[in-house]
Amino acid sequence: MNYYKGFFINEPVGNNIFSYDERKQKKIYVPPLKEGNIEDAKIGENIVFCEIEDKNEINALGLEYFIKYLFNEKDVYIFDNHNHAFYFWVESLKRGKFKKGIKLVHVDQHKDMREPNTYIKDINDLENVFKYTNFNLNVGNFIKPALKLGIFSDVVILDNLNSFYLDINEEFVLDIDLDIFSKDMDYIDYDLKISKIKELIKKSKVITIATSPFFIEQNYAIDVLKEIFKF
């Protein structure tokens, strides 16, 4: 069953918790999921992330749809805010797309290793996983629950220049945040990032990709998304 049908979060939970009391915009949108391809990744009309930065309220538009994309027999999930990766990891695991306990390779400007307020006890009920992903987790704390549950045995983080020269030969799920291409990360050569990510795509079992509207301009993120799937 597809639980991602498009809905608003109005309460200060999940990704809507950031600066909630200080901002005027009180709700964020979670887009519906559809099967498609890279060309279906487009900016929507709804605000998916709000935050106060330097006393300015930033309201970021996200994707029109989340996309489930079959690439060379691999499941690829494309979404805006990064916490949704947790749900799609569980869904893929339940569908036998990867073995429990393999590694996670996390390519991101940020480590996203904060502690959540609560840990889900099990992943038997996919609806509960969906609720936990959307109403408990946020963009900074979705990896540790996956490690605690044994979905992954370890995480390899690519967030600096040296890490892009690592050789990863074990089975892994690939998790990409396109903010690795933000201006703050321009000190890492663009072509190096593209080539490394393409190498990892070929080796991975499942791929999750966040466009991260608050951290990178979305038209550029979508352009990069298309580039990494040019083979």
Image (tube, rainbow, N blue to C red):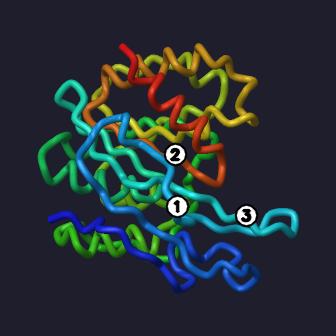
Query: Disc 2 on helix, strand or loop?
Result: loop
Q: Amino acid at mark 2?
A: Thr
The Cα–Cα distance between marks 2 and 3, rounded to whole angstroms, is: 16 Å
Secondary structure under the numbered disc 1 in the rendered image: strand
Whether pointer 1 and pointer 2 mark residues with C-beta atoms closer than 8 Å, the reply is no
Where disc 3 sits, the SS reads strand
First in sequence, mark 2 or 3: give its number: 3
**On the picture, is 191 further left or further right than 168?**
right
Residue 69, image quadrant: top left
Q: Quadrant of the N terminus?
A: bottom left
Between disc 1 and disc 3, whose residue precedes? 1
From the viewer's perspective, is 199 left or right of 72?
right
Cα distance between the residues tagged 1 and 2: 15 Å
Q: Which residue is more in the foreground, 125 or 40? A: 40
Residue 181's disc number: none
Q: What numbered label is drawn on residue 58?
A: 3
**Residue toward you, 207 or 144:** 207
Residue 228 appears at what percent x and percent y? 45, 23
Coordinates of residue 25 in the picture (x, y in percent): 66, 78
The residue carrying mark 1 is: 45
Q: Is residue 86 above or below residue 8?
A: above
Q: Are the residues flagged by discs 2 and 3 in contact, CB closer than 8 Å?
A: no
- Pointer 2 residue: 211
Please state which of the two labelled residues, at mark 1 or mark 3, is closer to the viewer: 1
Estimate how packed mark 3 is, as few (under 14), some (14 to 19) or many (20 or more) residues with alpha carbons within 10 Å.
some
Which residue is drawn at the image coordinates 23% and 73% (left, top)?
A: 127
Q: Residue at x 65, y 44 (%)?
A: 216
- Amino acid found under the numbered disc labelled 1: Glu
